[in-house]
Amino acid sequence: MSLTDAEVSKLAADLHQARQAGIAIPPLTARHPGMTMADGYRVQQELVAALTAGGERVVGYKLGLTSTPMQQLLGVDSPDFAPVLSSHLNPDGAAVSAASFIAPRVEAEIALVLREDLRGPDCTALDVAAAVTGAVAALEIVDSRIADWKIKLADTIADLASSGAVVLGPALTPAAGLDLRVLGMVLTCNGNLIATGAGAAALGNPLQAVAWLVQTLHPLGEDLRAGQFIMTGALHAAVDITAGQNYRAEFDRLGAVGLRVR
Amino acid sequence: MTGTDAAASVRELAARLVDAETKRTPIAALTTTCGPFGVGTAYEVQDAVVAARVQDGAVVAGAKLGLTSAAKQRQMHVDQPLYGWLTDHMALDVGQPLDCGRLIQPRCEPEIAFLMSRDLAGPQVTAAHVLAATAALYPAIDVLDSRFAGYSFTLPDVVADNASAAGFLLGGQATEPGGVDLRLTGLVLEKNGELVGTAAGAAVLGHPAAAVAWLVRALAGRGRGLAAGQVVIAGALTEAVPVAPGDTIVAHFDRLGTVELACRD
């Protein structure tokens, strides 16, 4: 049973409040056990509308649940997505405050930047390859406004796919000739290895991940625009972050990106 | 225990392992059935196991590393890797299937292989020396087959069991080490077309050449080294994947190419 418009508005307002206050709320799906994926996106859209009305801009998109282990953890068989908002963007080497998040974790990802719009129900990885201008080393801080990450699919979708902050590397590497599937990544914390991975961890291929996003946006009447970027999904299991640490993701061919946690 | 008894004990432990492999019958961990022994003794047992194979006509073709990831070392409560020896009888060639029928409980691991261009020995060898002594790099698959039931063992057990060595396959593309940063080299592992893991070379002790350097230093402690023409498979980039007849394992490495292994009865 899908949620009423009033219920959707209430949940969006609660999440908005939780984001501003930095205080987690119980799972939305605990209040509304019948809440569907579509309901989750309705809440997300209303939350994004409220945030953009407050001055935010949509600068890109992020994909979540792009790995089989994460999908299995939530008992789902598809990824999810959310817009990335302008205030979430940080430059390479940024110092972020742990206190500005609730339960932050870091993920290393390949970000793709578009030089052409992408839309349509039949978008393929090849279409995406032709529309991408380049790839960027990226870190994402994921965070959950749902207490203790006790999320189901509809919860994380509504909560902007558990997004927190994005750090983009300094260099845009031309995509032509890159095989993103086998592109390697090494994540370190204060110089100590904490994870490795390769592009295929993101839905088999980051280009495929973007094609999924375009196909999924289509029935919602949305599309991707030239100049936007897409965070294509974590290449490893997310890592809890703590204050005082330096995280650095180094990618073969793309270079490195880092952040400090205050 | 007298020296003679200790030697007999090493021979006895080695005989049990050789027997398990020959008869394709797993045994319980030696440290549980034959009393505890240390890593030093375990390498003596390993030498005796390899010597028995050489006596049967096998030739030592190189070495392999195990427990090269921090996660594996934590799991085994150790703080260093281990090594074993590869023989020519274990070598698979490109396109040749793995005969699971000769194995107990095979598992595959994706690794980076080093073909040595010259002898390398000494207690001060580093990754830079290893790369300078490497003729070519290959994508590789390490076939494990613990002689211990259910891969249930302690560090001395697996050392004695020659690091579970059973087979190895090098891909058909050789790459010169110059210009490749193995730390960042990406890997995608597939089983029957399904993604089972991704990693980069740093998963192996921070750098696969550093793992080979550790091996050379460890060998130096026993007055040994690597010889020109020998192959070293430097340690797993991912968890080991169990295989059965009908399975196909493919490891795609950035810059190094692909290696594929089909499994049959």
Image: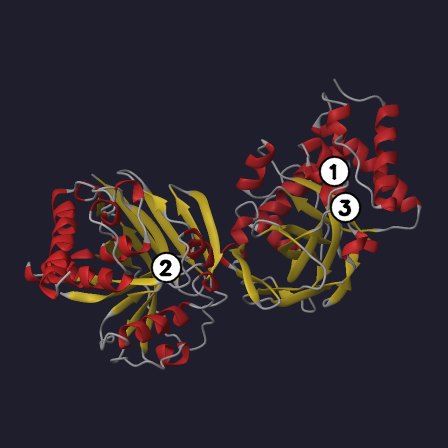
- Do the residues marked 2 and 3 share a common chain? no
Can you tell which quarter of the image residue A72 is in?
top right
Q: Relative to residue B60, is residue A57 depicted above or below?
A: above
The residue under label 3 is which amino acid type?
Answer: Pro
The residue shown at (57%, 36%) is A73
Number of marks drawn:
3
Residue wearing tag 1:
A147
The residue where tag 3 is placed is A83
Task: Locate residue B229, reporting x and y percent.
Answer: 22, 73
Q: Amino acid at mark 2?
A: Glu
Left or right of A106 on screen, residue B67: left
Q: Is residue B72 left or right of residue B3?
A: right
Q: Chain of mark 2?
A: B
Tell me if residue A224 can be seen.
no
Q: Residue furthest left?
A: B56
Q: Nearer the viewer, residue A111 or A67?
A: A67
Residue kind at label 1, given as amino acid type: Ala
Q: What residue is disc 2 on?
A: B111
Residue A241 coordinates in the image, percent (x, y): 67, 55
The quadrant of the rendering that contains the N terminus of chain A is top right
Q: Are marks 1 and 2 on the same chain?
A: no
Instruction: Name the element at disc 3.
Output: strand
How far apart marks 1 and 2 lie (CA) works out to: 41 Å
The chain letter under disc 3 is A
Question: Judging from the image, what secondary structure is the residue with disc 2 in?
Answer: strand
Give the x, y percent position of residue B263: 26, 43
Q: Marks 3 and 1, how far apart in space?
A: 22 Å
